[in-house]
Amino acid sequence: MKIVEVRTIPLMGRTPEGGWDHEIEPEENLHTLVQVVSDETVDGQPLTGIGSVYTSQALVEGALKLTRPWLIGECAIEPERVSEKLHQMAFWQGRGGAVTHAISGIDIAMWDLLGKVSGQPVARLLGGYYRDRIKPYGSILFDEPAKLRDKLQQVVARGFRAIKLGWRPFGRVDRHTDESLVSTARDTVGPDVEIMVDAGGSEQFWPHGYKWAIETARMLAAYDITWFEEALPPDDIEGFIKLREHSPVPISTGEVLTRRQSFIPWIERGAVDIIQPDCTKVGGLSESRRIGWMAYDHNVLLVPHGWNTAVGLAADLHLAAALPVARWVEYLTPSPYIEEIVATPFKLDDEGLLPIPTTPGLGIELDWEGIKRYSP
């Protein structure tokens, strides 16, 4: 079975807010779906796999201009080998950047295709099911207290029993504001809903260092916060090592890192309690699985970062199923790119857990009418 074509599908029109200082607009394209098309057909239609990239179509197409000659004619059901070939071939022209992001989508699509051909779910191909459901945490942005309270009530009403709050205005006004936001969140959801806090240290020109981070961590501990994410800029490994050693709450980061090699010092040097690779940027499922086992061997948790599409969420679910220790997956909510582009939407059970697909491939069926609404 050979690869004959690679297609891209941009998503735009309902792009969720990102929390950045210069806020993105709904019409901006930050997510791109990737189809890997094989030379085999089913009922007259080519057999394809679907992947997702947290990168614009323009950048993905630029990367594909480079990588297509190495892809077309390749075996369509050998994702790890083909993805590694692309990483090696593109070494001098995009290592760790947009090219790696594009390879992520190709890799996910090839795992989906392999699952469909073999009649197996991706989780089983990645090693097997350690669990068949997992707790999703609903990801939302901080806001002023009255609006934040409404947002939180809506997320709990959707069935979530864990919520991550991030970015504006947290860390961008003063300490009193930070504690007021966290206090509002805890008072609103009560003691039985987990709360995670994401400072957003990967925002442009992040102004805070270790002393702000450690004082904030101590404040967060008083509100039983599950973890403190991106408290420092994403390249400050020395700061993270010191913060993790002294923080009373677990420390997490990793969403901007790419390729497994970038994660080695963070894991081996004890910079984090939780590592957070993004499957749609890091190199796909092939790289994420390797990072997951490396983390497991060093007693570090892996929680996939997923500011995501339905395809990316499905990939994260399969990854979490196939790792011995996995507790959460990120679920951006509400998001039409998750909830309105699949034929059967994801649904939390009565315990706030999300079932992991067990049908072949990623186990989702796209709603092409829904995709047309968000793709020109």
Image (cartoon, grey):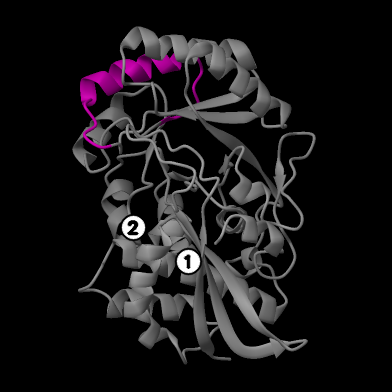
* Mark 2 and mark 1 residues within 8 Å of each other at the beta carbon: no
Q: Is residue 102 magenta?
A: no
The residue most toward the front is 376
Q: Amino acid at mark 1?
A: Gly
Magenta range is 204-228
On-image quarter of the N terminus: bottom right
Q: Is residue 216 magenta?
A: yes
**Which label sits in the foreground, 2 or 1?**
1
- Seen at 80% across and 34% down, the residue is 350
**Label ID, residue 258:** 2
Horizontal relation, residue 238 to residue 249: left or right: left
Horizontal relation, residue 194 to residue 219: left or right: right
Neighbour tally class for label 1: few under 14, some 14-19, many 20 plus, Cα within 10 Å: many
What residue did someone put label 1 on?
105
Q: Of residues 157 and 295, which is closer to you in this image?
A: 157
Query: Where is residue 261, by image quadrant?
Result: bottom left
Q: Amino acid at mark 2?
A: Thr
Element under label 2?
Answer: loop
The alpha-carbon separation of the residues under discs 2 and 1 comes to 13 Å
Element under label 1?
Answer: helix
| Sequence-earlier tag: 2 or 1 | 1
- Seen at 47% across and 92% down, the residue is 73
- Seen at 71% across and 40% down, the residue is 353
- Counting from the top left corner in percent of width and height, residue 288 is at 45, 59
Count of marks overlaid on the render = 2
Residue 316 in sight here: yes
- Seen at 46% across and 58% down, the residue is 280
Q: Of residues 173 and 9, which is closer to you in this image?
A: 9
